[in-house]
Image (cartoon, rainbow, N blue to C red):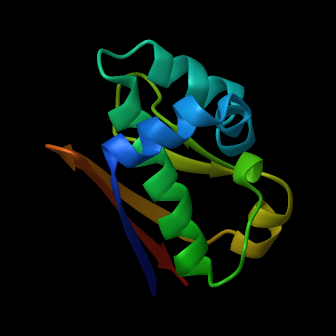
Amino acid sequence: MRIGTDIEQISRVADALARTPKLEEKLFTPAERAYCAGRGRPAQHFAARFCAKEAFAKAMSVPLSWQEVEIVREDGGAPEIRVTGDAARLLAGRAVRLSLSHAGDYAIAMVLIED
């Protein structure tokens, strides 16, 4: 098994996205941007997705393209990681588990990859 975790200050992510508008397009897929924008506190959802991508990269132990790792919620269920391109090739059929949480000014994600 491989484990990755990441924690971020929500306000830090919000400030970075406000300072650099193109950053949102670089870090998040169109579906992720639409999901977060439709929430009451978009910054906490962007921060949690950023954490999930970082945690996934740590668990894989390789740098990955931000656009190849997408956090999705299908039918209102739990968030999941969907990968494409090189990330999908590197994952090669392994099971991925994701947990997201946010409280106060912090978001956290943990990723477990089963070999």
Q: Is residue 88 above or below residue 42?
A: below
Name, please, the residue furthest toward the left: 104
Quarter of image, res 32: top right
Q: Tally the numbered discs.
A: 0
Q: Is residue 3 left or right of residue 34?
A: left
Against 32, residue 27 (above or below) is: below
Q: Is residue 88 left or right of residue 58?
A: right
Q: Position of residue 80 (x, y in %)?
A: 47, 46
Image coordinates of residue 34 in percent, x first then y, are: 57, 18
Q: Vertically, is 48 above or below 58?
A: above
What is the residue that sits farthest to the right in this orientation?
85
Residue at image point 21% right, 45% down: 105
Residue 50 visible within the image: yes
**Residue at (46% x, 24% y) in the render:** 36
- At which x and y percent is residue 39? 36, 17
| Location of residue 103 by image quarter | top left
Asked whether the viewer can see residue 92, the reply is no
Q: In the image, what residue occupies the spot 54% across and 29% down?
A: 18
Quick one: 82 or 40, which is closer to the camera? 40
Q: Position of residue 47 (x, y in %)?
A: 41, 44
Image quadrant occupied by the N terminus: bottom left
